[in-house]
Image: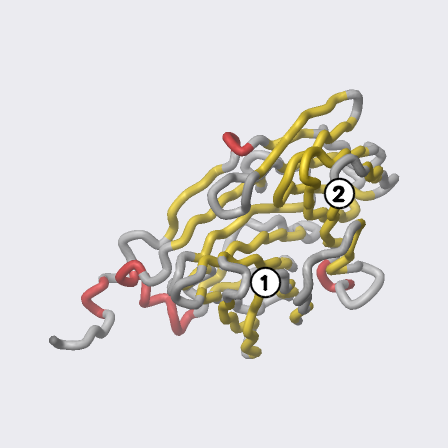
Amino acid sequence: MQIRHRIPFIRGYTPLSDRAGAGAEMLMDFGVLKLDEGECYEDASAVDERIWLLSGGAALVSWEGQSAEISRPDLFDHSPWCLSVPSGCPVTIKAGKGGCEFYRCATDNPRPIRSRLYTPGECRSEFRGEGTMRETSTRIVRTIFDDTNRPESNLVIGEVIGLPGKWSSYPPHHHPQPEIYHYRFLPSQGFGLTAIGNTPYIIKDRDTIYIKDGEDHPQVTAPGYAMWYLWVIRHIEGNHYGKQYVAEDHQWVTGPEDRIWQPKR
């Protein structure tokens, strides 16, 4: 399912997935918060753990008697700041100079977890796809946290930078846990393509995609453009995310490159 959002986000909070509505199968709420300089926003929940990821600008974030001034010039060249808090923990965000924009994700989690602010230096950033498929699926993957460093959470979160003209989330794969993708492009008029299961979509700046159980979800970025997308996965009861199932028909592409056809010159 695709949620289109063609215009810039308005001030305040804009929901993009709602567990009480069309996003019920995603098992998590997801949206974007945009604040002008000096504006404040308070967030609390008695039942939900929450993630606040800074996508741009500067802000003072406060939680559980702690505070930090954070900033991010842009999504593509700078790794993220991400605040993860348990249920019952209030969060206050005050926009700094020039304002700020955050992505928020929330889901129920009865387990006690400690609050943590993940810094850009802690983000695991790697080039994936290098040395395979003639570099046609080389991309940057940034993992903020997963079961290896936050097993008590019900969420997994990270970012991908799709390089111009190249594929990501490839080879086509799926997993039983629901996932949300949210896209930005550089320049912003850029676009990409995806196939969620057997349904193709043209993806543009600020679009959101819902990925359900068993749906393959490869992506490709149009030449000349860079594609950033935030990915959030919701663990399911008794089955935490940790394994991807590559579509059987396409498993061979990760083998020796001489099996891949190329034109004779």
Q: Residue at x 29, y 58 (%)?
A: 132
Quadrant in which the N terminus is drawn = bottom right
Residue ID for mark 1: 205
Q: Is residue 107 left or right of residue 174?
A: right
- Give the residue type at disc 1: Asp
Q: Residue at x 61, y 46 (%)?
A: 156
Colour mode? Answer: secondary structure
Q: Nearer the viewer, residue 173 or 105?
A: 105
Residue ID for mark 2: 36
Q: Secondary structure at mark 2?
A: loop
Disc 2 crowd rating (10 Å Cα; few below 14, some 14-19, many 20+) is some
Q: Is residue 143 left or right of residue 110?
A: left
Measured from the top left, where is residue 230 in percent x and y? 58, 52
Measured from the top left, where is residue 22 in percent x and y? 78, 68
- Classify residue 256 by image quadrant: bottom left
Up-down: is 263 above or below 91? below
- Classify residue 255 by image quadrant: bottom left
Q: Residue at x 63, y 64 (%)?
A: 207
Q: Is residue 229 left or right of residue 105?
A: left
Disc 1 crowd rating (10 Å Cα; few below 14, some 14-19, many 20+) is many
Measured from the top left, where is residue 162 in percent x and y? 45, 57
- Classify residue 87 by image quadrant: top right
